[in-house]
């Protein structure tokens, strides 16, 4: 089921989360993690988004 549409307004803060399917690992190596940061940077530049903070959480089993 899709999430409801977000109400948008100027200068708002929006949390963004992402998780792998079945909580599996998203980044299988340092290269993938660095590529993610590159994509994040280019998207921020392209759309003028300001990233105030981020957190990559690792699950230990």
Image (cartoon, rainbow, N blue to C red):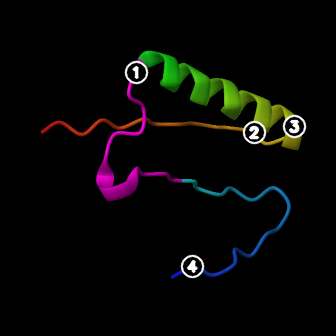
Q: 1 or 5, which is in the foreground?
A: 1
Q: Residue at x 38, y 28 (%)?
A: 28
Where 22 sits versus 50, above or below? below
Can you give x and y, in whole percent of width and height, for residue 22 in the image? 31, 57
The tag earlier along the polypeptide, 4 or 3, is: 4
Where 30 sits versus 37, above or below? above
Give me the C-alpha separation between circle 3 and circle 1: 26 Å
In the image, taking residue 19 as reference, residue 12 lies left or right, namely: right
Taken as a whole, is the magenta stretch helix, strand or loop?
loop
Give me the C-alpha separation between circle 4 and circle 1: 30 Å
Of all residues shown, which one is farthest toward the left? 61
Can you give x and y, in whole percent of width and height, for residue 57 in the image? 35, 38
Q: Mark 2 touching mark 4, by CB under 8 A?
A: no
On residue 50, the disc is: 2
Give me the C-alpha separation between circle 2 and circle 3: 11 Å
Can you give x and y, in whole percent of width and height, for residue 15 in the image? 58, 55
Give me the C-alpha separation between circle 1 and circle 2: 26 Å
The tag earlier along the polypeptide, 2 or 4, is: 4
Q: Quadrant of the C terminus?
A: top left
| Residue under label 3 | 46
| Residue under label 4 | 2
Q: Residue at x 57, y 36 (%)?
A: 53
In the image, taking residue 41 as reference, residue 16 lies left or right, namely: left
The tag earlier along the polypeptide, 1 or 2, is: 1
Q: What's the magenta region?
A: 17-29
The tag earlier along the polypeptide, 4 or 1, is: 4
What kind of element bears circle 1?
Answer: loop
On residue 29, the disc is: 1
The tag earlier along the polypeptide, 3 or 1, is: 1
Q: 32 or 42, which is in the foreground?
A: 32
Q: Does residue 33 show up magenta in the picture?
A: no
> Which of pointers 4 and 3 indicates the residue nearer the eye?
4
């Amino acid at each position: 089921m899709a999430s409801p549409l977000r109400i948008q307004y100027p200068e708002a803060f929006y949390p963004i989360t992402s998780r792998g399917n079945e909580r599996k690992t998203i980044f299988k190596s340092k290269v993938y993690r660095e590529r993610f940061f590159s994509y994040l940077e280019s998207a921020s530049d392209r759309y003028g988004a300001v990233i105030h903070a981020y957190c990559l959480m690792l699950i230990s089993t």
